[in-house]
Amino acid sequence: MAAHVTPATFVSDDAAVFDALSHPLHMRRIGGGSETDVYAAEGAGYVVKFKRDLSGSPERVLAHALRHRAVSELFAAYLGDEHAITSAYVVVGDEQGRAQLLVVQPFLGDAQQLASVKYGELSSQERQVIARQLRDLVRRALRCWRATGHLPDLHGTHSVSAAERRWLNTAAAAPRRIWRFVAREHLLRSHNLLLAGGPEPHVVLVDYDPVRWRSPLRALYHAARWVLFWRDDWLIRRLERSP
């Protein structure tokens, strides 16, 4: 889906963002990470992700939107239709020449983050299905990394409010983020993977952002994710063997 610029009023607060989308329905914050606030358009069947740190000139933001779209298409192609959803990239701007990037995705109302799944309440067969899908997702993600240099973030970070998201980006929050990254961010408690319902539950990735750091920092980050996948594999196999 093509990125495009709309002649919307510049979004100085959340209400203006949703006015810019010309949608009258109520929006509520349902989640977010360190860079994004996620809102649900109640009754409309989609979510809006407000990329708070991607604003500026329309040309700059449009360039970001096109890059994000290209990488998201790579991730979706490697992960496959059963594990991916579509993402529309929208740039909204004002008459003063400023712009903001929004991402619009389908709202999976029957899905829950893996971070909130109570595995002990699932049947042995359901746990085995999830375990097989997670191992398959890791293989597909690593295949994408080797072929393209881009690694989808299957783990994700979490913020309970916009205020916490802002705090997570401060220097004071760095020790906590590193501890989370090493000790708590594993695939069974992922915030970027949802367990969607249906005839057979399936795991879906909802975050398609590229890593914006330049090498060698990006390479170091990807290497750390690769190491965490080894830890994840042990946890996934434990889940699969659980009675």
Image (spheres, rainbow, N blue to C red):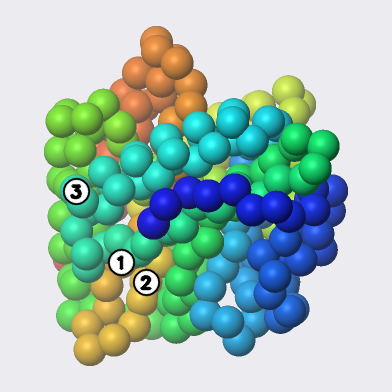
Task: Kindly state the secondary structure of the residue where label 1 is placed.
Answer: strand
Residue at 68% x, 74% y is: 23
Mark number, residue 78: 3
**Residue 94 in the image: x percent, y percent?**
77, 45
Question: Horizontally, is 106 left or right of 145 in the view?
Answer: right
CA–CA distance between discs 3 and 1?
Answer: 14 Å
- Judge the density around disc 3: few (<14), some (14-19), many (≥20) Cα neighbours within 10 Å: many
- Give the mark, 3 or 2, whose residue is nearer the N terminus: 3
- Judge the density around disc 1: few (<14), some (14-19), many (≥20) Cα neighbours within 10 Å: many
Q: Which numbered mark, 3 or 1, is in the foreground of this view?
A: 3
Please give the residue where the numbered disc 2 appears in the rendered image.
195
**Residue 121 in the image: x percent, y percent?**
38, 82
Task: Kindly state the secondary structure of the residue where label 3 is placed.
Answer: helix
Residue at 34% x, 41% y is: 70
Q: From what the image shows, is residue 160 above or below residue 214?
A: below
Residue at 22% x, 83% y is: 200
Task: Report the amino acid beneath label 2.
Answer: Leu
Can residue 231 be seen at all in this image of the molecule? no
Task: Kindly state the secondary structure of the residue where label 2 is placed.
Answer: strand
Which quadrant, please, contains the N terminus? Answer: bottom left
- Identify the image quadrant of residue 32: bottom right
Mark number, residue 17: none
Please give the residue where the numbered disc 1 appears in the rendered image.
203
Q: Are marks 1 and 2 in contact (CB under 8 Å)?
A: yes
Question: Horizontally, is 123 left or right of 216 in the view?
Answer: left
Task: Report the amino acid beneath label 3.
Answer: Tyr
Task: Report the amino acid beneath label 1.
Answer: Val
CA–CA distance between discs 3 and 2?
Answer: 19 Å
